[in-house]
Amino acid sequence: MTATKIQTASEALGDVLLDLGWMMGCAESCTGGLLAGAITSIAGSSQWFERGFVTYSNAAKVQNLRVNEATLERFGAVSEETAMEMAAGVLMAARDAQFAISTTGIAGPGGATAGKPVGMVCFGFAQRVDDGFSTRAVTRIFEGDRGQVRESSVLFALINAIEIIRPR
């Protein structure tokens, strides 16, 4: 059921991006490429998907996405601050993209820390604007096993991306 919802959401995101003439990219940690996989499973996605990064380690976040080491030290990899910097980092790397999504979280079954339970995922959304980037973040806690948390994260990211960029 979730796979069908993910495919439908991916197609809908593609339609919105095509209507705007936009390209997008993504940066993933806890979803490990599932978001990019969902997007690229759609025929013709090369017309609206520019690139994706899987930056699982903090070093990869710093090297590939220019996430500030101080952000990681102060807030941790699983934080809205890091998610926003990851999304902005995609736009710095993908100069032809107008929009980016990032995911960073704790899919489980281990890895929980005080204030950061298993299932907690932070999402970053970045949009290119005249003088740089507009970023926002949101955090959700998902139920289920590792696979369910990751799939729920992909679906949430896709649906929220549509809500953010859909022309009013």
Image (cartoon, rainbow, N blue to C red):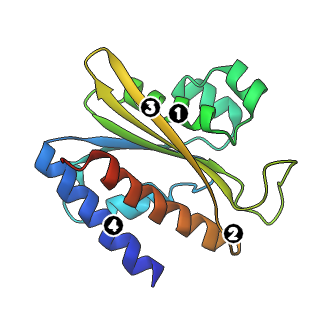
The kind of secondary structure element at disc 4 is helix
Q: Which residue is mark 3?
A: 135
The residue positioned 18% from the left and 48% from the top of the image is 168
Q: Amino acid at mark 1?
A: Met
Q: Relative to residue 121, is residue 130 drawn left or right?
A: left
Tell me the CA gap for discs 4 and 1: 22 Å
The picture places residue 152, in percent across and down from the top left corner, at: 54, 68
Tell me the CA gap for discs 1 and 3: 6 Å
Tell me the CA gap for discs 1 and 2: 23 Å
The picture places residue 129, in percent across and down from the top left corner, at: 28, 24
Circle nearer the N terminus (4, 1): 4
Q: Which residue is mark 1?
A: 84
Q: Amino acid at mark 3?
A: Thr
Q: Amino acid at mark 4?
A: Ala
Q: Considering only vertical position in the picture, is 32 above or below 11? A: above
Q: Are marks 1 and 2 in contact (CB under 8 Å)?
A: no
